[in-house]
Image: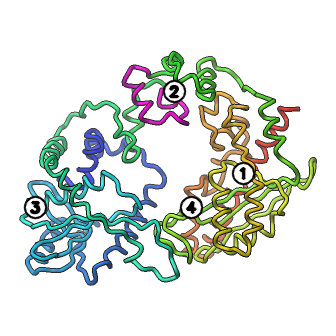
Amino acid sequence: MLSKTKYCAYIQCPKNLWLKVHRPELAVEDGAAEERKSEGNEVGDLAMRLFGDFVEVTAYGEDGRLDLAKMIAATEELVREGAPVICEASFSFRGAYCAVDILRREGDGYAIYEVKSSTEEKKIYINDISYQKYVLEGCGIRVVGTYLITVNKKYVFDGVLKPDELFRIVDVGDKVAEQMPEVAENVKAASKLLDEESEPCHDLCMGCHEPHDCEFWQYCTRHLPTPSIFDVCGTGFGFGKKLEYYKSGVRSFADARGEKKIMKTKYRSLQITHELECLGTEIDRDGIRSFLDTLWFPLYFLDFETVKLVVPQYEGTKPNAQIPFQYSLHYLEAEGGELRHKEFLAVSGENPLRPIAESLCRDIPRDACVIIYNKTFEPPRLAELADYFPDLAEHLLCIRANTRDLMEPFKNGYYYNREMMGSYSIKKVLPAVFPGDPSLDYANLEGIHNGSEAMTVFPRIKDMPPEEQAAARRQLLEYCKLDTYATVKLWEELVRVTK
């Protein structure tokens, strides 16, 4: 049976729908998929309260799966009774099924409210709502309104959660009306595709990347050379541009080297040339020195870990704010001095903002040179902390002003080798510069190996038994410590090659 999820998969790419149904084992899900699902459930549960009392028809069978027949029957009965608000209202029309997040009675009909945990209005959401309207009207329901409920990015949590302020309700009736003439044909084509035994022939398209990265990308690109045009570094060279080159026949790095527009950018030229000619490390000593000359002692190497909450929990914060809960700090007071370390990890379940801000001010002198890796992350967090706590703002903004980004020499191509594969992410640069060093291998860490895992684990610690809490905290500390130790080692390498 077709569902709204499957319908939207068809809109994204027909092949995506077929693979979801017939070859789901080929999917490669990203590590944050479960967390996004959990966030969506939390937001959905909160949104149910928007219109007062409601009836939810969600039902499960003995096998633990949704009992759609029971949900459809319960919805039919509630509609006959004129129930004012039905959540997960379920309908089936000619093999097309949908569950409406919130179905609200308005006058002599019902309005559809689709809930999303995003702060944005996306075209695929309109596809979703249009499909629901098609199914409901097929079942004889008079649809008198179609609305999208998203999270209000301007909402500021004041200590008491207010769902009517947290959410933003948008009337998307006009946009749905524009799509409705296409829905019946799309449903027919999607339903037919579900019954096809043979995999459809469908080339790469924007649906591989929009509205989200396709989980079947690895399978659908197995015919491409390794590396391919899609592996060319992407700064100013996004997926759409790569797709254009692909469709014109530019598939391999050898093909790409023949394209002047691709090769005119220094970093892309480095990547392609080093790959094709199997070159070793290329070093621009003058460029590296120009960066090192901007540093001074004492040197403090800083890295944050943050949690991103769709529904804010801490007073003064907004939805999706990056909340720092941990940092690692390696430091050298003078050239040739002893490398020392400090760290901070907040208590899970408590507001970490004031404690981490105070700890930073204690641990980092105003005049220290603070080395980070990727200026788009730590400096904004420091500015946000300064906004939260005006009494600490001067010190925090001094730290921010004194940050220097160790990514710059790698991003500018002053230090490059083939193993970096066109990336200047620390997770790519580190093994390229120090191949085979077990002390710098994130895979050797226990439990937590990347920022996404850290972000997921921290909020859950409060609900763990004491022994598990201690283990999780230890793993978080070891992970964050490696981030700053890795930055120290990369700085040492830059110093070494300029001597």
Q: Is 194 above or below relative to 1?
A: above
Camera-near label (1 vs 2) is 1
Check residue 134 for magenta coloring.
no
Expressed as whole percent of the image width and height from the top left, the position of residue 44 reads: 35, 69
Considering only order in the chain, which callout, 2 or 3, is on the residue closer to the N terminus? 3
Q: Which residue is mark 2?
A: 227
Mark 3 to mark 1 CA distance (whole Å): 56 Å
Q: Name the image quarter holding residue 140.
A: bottom left
Q: Which residue is mark 3?
A: 137
The residue drawn where x is 56% and y is 22% is 263
Q: Is 323 above or below relative to 180?
A: below
Disc 2 marks a residue whose amino acid type is Pro
The residue drawn where x is 41% and y is 34% is 240
Expressed as whole percent of the image width and height from the top left, the position of residue 217 reads: 40, 38
Considering only order in the chain, which callout, 3 or 4, is on the residue closer to the N terminus? 3
- Residue 372, disc: 1
Considering only order in the chain, which callout, 2 or 1, is on the residue closer to the N terminus? 2
Asked if the residue under mark 4 is in contact with the one under mark 1, i.e. CB atoms within 8 Å, the reply is: no
Q: Which residues, given as a range, are shown in magenta?
A: 227-250
